[in-house]
Structure formats: structure tokens, C-alpha cells
């Protein structure tokens, strides 16, 4: 299959966002990762999983000092403006809940939110996640289990959505 | 009978990573453990909600362009790598068609004179990148000395005693702005800047590429491609490879490249050859 980098950009941006928790810095991270991918293009093996290769570069770029050079948590609200609390009445309850869950995910520590995102959102296999993050398979599973536990705790501690912001439900017969 | 289902099984079940037989075992086990089953189903629901909630952020168009250009460069590098590796004949054939088609679609005005379906060589890609860098850094306006050309030609060569031959534009109105070394995949390239009487730039990117495959007759004919929205004309001569780009018109680039290529070919064939 011919490599198609652009089709993987949304996944790279999502992963970069979860790693950096900031939209601007996520794009910086994606660009820096592409520059590093260019420099290391010879490490890509034709036929290998391109998405996994790219995600691993994003991951390595982030953990190899790039993040330390950036200021942390410049603006959680900037990433998902209505993640923690919707500013406008959403049209569907799932959207409200999704924002709430996303806000909780972003409050998880490093190593928890990114691995959960790769498994739940990107649908990577555990072997692919191990490859992206450079950790053993067993570590992937234990981290995932712990991340889910932390997500549940975050959601249990989160305030309920105010009644005024709850979506209006319509009974469909 | 001991409990066969582990926490790892439950995690893998939530992520849909169990094979069917194991999935059946876990579901049977969950049927007998309603409290755990409720937690597992809640976790599955959270995964669904994450998929709804996690969307790519909106990126300002200016930043999108930069990212897209990087993605395009990387894609060309990987395509080239595919060709170099010769993974499969059939794949390579598809690739040539795809690259040619993509380039034509991307830049409708930039049709190669001979063979648009050739994959863009690394040096041409690097020439385009070096030109963009020079524009960004306003190199042509500052920091160039016209007497550096000879020195740069020597430094860009594998053997400093034998400079990289650098063609010059013919005709009146051309002003040599200077030269500098620019990095590329195989070492240093000579990047020479000329300005025409209208103030437009013509930039020559010349490299020594002795490690490349044996040149084919088609390599001697300048090819035109569009890279990041700008025409780049490239050709080879022996161990040297050239790419020209700039703000001058595509026609000027092609005329210059045709003249330079035929001059260097004449020089290579015999002592009667004239300068470019």
C-alpha cells in the first residue's frame, strides 16, 4: 500500500492533543514529529504499519525533552473549550457526556490519558500500543487497567452537569 | 474449579481485543458476576464516549499549510524509499502513475516536458526546501557574497580540488547575488542565487551524487515538477545533479535548464562544448 501521510494527520493531532493538552502545542508537536520523521525516514520499513510508526515518533518526540521545553498546561480550556463544562446547551446527551468524559481524561496523569486514548479512540492493538510507547505488552495492559480506574475516579469526583445545561430530551414514539 | 478470567482479560474484553472463544469465556464469567459486569459495561460506554469526545482541534489555516507541506515532503521521501527498495514491481508501477497523477493534479500548470510520472528525486525535493528556507530567511537580501561562488563550488564537491560545475544564466540582465552551502541528504549542496532584471530570483541547487544509480538517458533531459506550489526543474549530468527553482516564471526556469543541460552534455562529450 502506498504511504499516505495526510490521512494519518487527524490521528496524530488527536494523540498530540492528549499528550500536550493544548491545541497550539499539539500542532507544534505534530510538526516537530514530521520533521523528525523526515530525518529518520530510512527507519520506516516499506510494508510496516505507517500509523504506528508515525504515532511512535509523536510519542518519542514528546517524551524526549520536547515537552520539557514547552510550558505545561498552557490552557486546558483552549484545547476543549467546553470539555469540562459545556458553554452552550448541546443537542444530544451523548455529546454532553462525551465532553465530560473527555475533560476527565485530560485530567488524568501522563501515561494514563495517552494510553487510554490509543486503545479506546484510535483502536490500536495492544501490540501496536507497546510499539508506539516502547513498553512491554504486559505494561500496556496494566497501565490501561489503572487508567480506566483513574478515569472512573475522576468522573465520580466531577460535579454533575447543571440542570440548566442538561439537554432537553424528547420522547420519540 | 479456579477462576479463569483475569483483570487483563477484562481489559482486553473492553477494548475488543479478545478472540471469539476467549470472549465467550469472559461473557459467561461476567454473567455470574453482575457487579463486575456492570463495571465492564460502564467502561465500554466510556470508551464509546471518548470516541465521540476526542476530535482533532481546529488549526489556523496558516499552521495547516506548514503541517501539510511537511506531510507532503515526508510522503515523497517514503514514496521514494519504496521505489528505491523496489518492494514490488507492480507496486512501483502503480507508484509512478500515482506520483505523476498526483503532481499533475496538485499543480495543473506544471507539466513535465518528457516524463512527469518519474518520482521526484531527493535532491529536487531538497532544492525546493532550501529555496523556501532562503526565502524565509531573506537570504537573497542579506548575507550573500558574490565572490563566494567558487569557494562554495569546491566545498560542495566530494573532492575539493574538483569544484561542482555551476551553470550560469545566459543573456543580459542577470545579476549574480551569491552562493552558499545548503544541507541535503547526502552532504552539502551549492545553492547559487541569481536575480533577473525584474527582480525575480532563479536559484540553482547543485549536488554531487556519486552514490546514485547509473544515470539513464532520460535523466539528462530536464524534468519539471511542482513542489509545494512552485515549479522545480531538475536533471543530472554524470555524478552531478541540478535543480533550479525560484520566483521567475516556469518558462524561464525551463529555458535555463535546457540550456544548461545541453551545455553540460556537450562539455561531457568533447572539448568543443561551450559554456552554459
Image: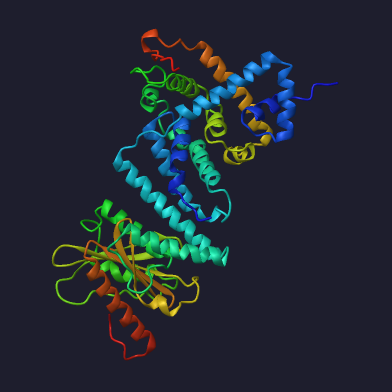
Q: How is the image coloured?
A: rainbow
| Residue B28 percent across, percent down from the top left | 74, 23
Q: Nearer the viewer, residue B48 or A87?
A: B48
Total marks placed:
0
Q: Quadrant of the N terminus of chain B?
A: top right
| Residue B34 percent across, percent down from the top left | 69, 14
Q: Quadrant of residue A164?
A: top left
Left or right position of B46 against B169 = right
Q: Quadrant of residue B151?
A: bottom left
Residue most toward the top?
A163
| Residue A168 percent across, percent down from the top left | 38, 14
Q: Nearer the viewer, residue B153 or B115?
A: B115
Q: Is residue B187 visible?
A: no
Give me the residue at 52% from left, 41% from top. Answer: A55
Residue most toward the front?
A173
Give me the residue at 39% from left, 28% from top. Answer: A79
Instruction: Work out whether A29 lies above or below A117.
Output: below
Q: Quadrant of the C terminus of chain B?
A: bottom left
Q: Nearer the viewer, residue B247 or B25?
A: B25
| Residue A25 percent across, percent down from the top left | 39, 34
Q: Nearer the viewer, residue A24 or A122?
A: A122
Q: Is residue A93 visible?
A: yes
Instruction: Work out whether B19 lies above or below B239.
Output: above
Left or right position of B191 against B219 = left
Amino acid at each position: 500500500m502506498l504511504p499516505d501521510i495526510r490521512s494519518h494527520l487527524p490521528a496524530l493531532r488527536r494523540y498530540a492533543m492528549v499528550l500536550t493538552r493544548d491545541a497550539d502545542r499539539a500542532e507544534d508537536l505534530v510538526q516537530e514529529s514530521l520533521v523528525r520523521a523526515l530525518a529518520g525516514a530510512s527507519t520506516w520499513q516499506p510494508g510496516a504499519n505507517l500509523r504506528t510508526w508515525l504515532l511512535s515518533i509523536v510519542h518519542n518526540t514528546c517524551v524526549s525533552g520536547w515537552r520539557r521545553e514547552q510550558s505545561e498546561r498552557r490552557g486546558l480550556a483552549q484545547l476543549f473549550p467546553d470539555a469540562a463544562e459545556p458553554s452552550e446547551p448541546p443537542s444530544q446527551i451523548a455529546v454532553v457526556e462525551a465532553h465530560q468524559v473527555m475533560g476527565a481524561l485530560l485530567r488524568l496523569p501522563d501515561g494514563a490519558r495517552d494510553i487510554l486514548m490509543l486503545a479506546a479512540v484510535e483502536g490500536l492493538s495492544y501490540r501496536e500500543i507497546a510499539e508506539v510507547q516502547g513498553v512491554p505488552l504486559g505494561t500496556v495492559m496494566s497501565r490501561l487497567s489503572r487508567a480506566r480506574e483513574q478515569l472512573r475516579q475522576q468522573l465520580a469526583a466531577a460535579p454533575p452537569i447543571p440542570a440548566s445545561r442538561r439537554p432537553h430530551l424528547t420522547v420519540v414514539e | 474449579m479456579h477462576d479463569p478470567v483475569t483483570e487483563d482479560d477484562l481489559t482486553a474484553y473492553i477494548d475488543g481485543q479478545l478472540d471469539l472463544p476467549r470472549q465467550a469465556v469472559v461473557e459467561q464469567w461476567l454473567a455470574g458476576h453482575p457487579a463486575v459486569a456492570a463495571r465492564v459495561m460502564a467502561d465500554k460506554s466510556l470508551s464509546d464516549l471518548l470516541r465521540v469526545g476526542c476530535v482533532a482541534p481546529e488549526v489556523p489555516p496558516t499552521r495547516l499549510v506548514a503541517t501539510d507541506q511537511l506531510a507532503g515532503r515526508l510522503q515523497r521521501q517514503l514514496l521514494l524509499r519504496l521505489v528505491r527498495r523496489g518492494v514490488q514491481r507492480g507496486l512501483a508501477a502503480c507508484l509512478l502513475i500515482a506520483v505523476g497523477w498526483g503532481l499533475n493534479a496538485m499543480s495543473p500548470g506544471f507539466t513535465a516536458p518528457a516524463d512527469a510520472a518519474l518520482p521526484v528525486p531527493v535532491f529536487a525535493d531538497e532544492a525546493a526546501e532550501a529555496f523556501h528556507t532562503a526565502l524565509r530567511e531573506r537570504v537573497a537580501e542579506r548575507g550573500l557574497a558574490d565572490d563566494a561562488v567558487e569557494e562554495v563550488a569546491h566545498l560542495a564537491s566530494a573532492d575539493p580540488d574538483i569544484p561542482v560545475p555551476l551553470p550560469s544564466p545566459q543573456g543580459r540582465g542577470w545579476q549574480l547575488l551569491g552562493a552558499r552551502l545548503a544541507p541535503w541528504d547526502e552532504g552539502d549542496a551549492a545553492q547559487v542565487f541569481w536575480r533577473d532584471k525584474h527582480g525575480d530570483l532563479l536559484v540553482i541547487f547543485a549536488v554531487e551524487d556519486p552514490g546514485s544509480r547509473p544515470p539513464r538517458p532520460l535523466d539528462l533531459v530536464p524534468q519539471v515538477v511542482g513542489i509545494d506550489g512552485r515549479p522545480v526543474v531538475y536533471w543530472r549530468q554524470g555524478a552531478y545533479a541540478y535543480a533550479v527553482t525560484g520566483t521567475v516564471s516556469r518558462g524561464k526556469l525551463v529555458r535555463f535548464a535546457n540550456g544548461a543541460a545541453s551545455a553540460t552534455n556537450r562539455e561531457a562529450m568533447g572539448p568543443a562544448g561551450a559554456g552554459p
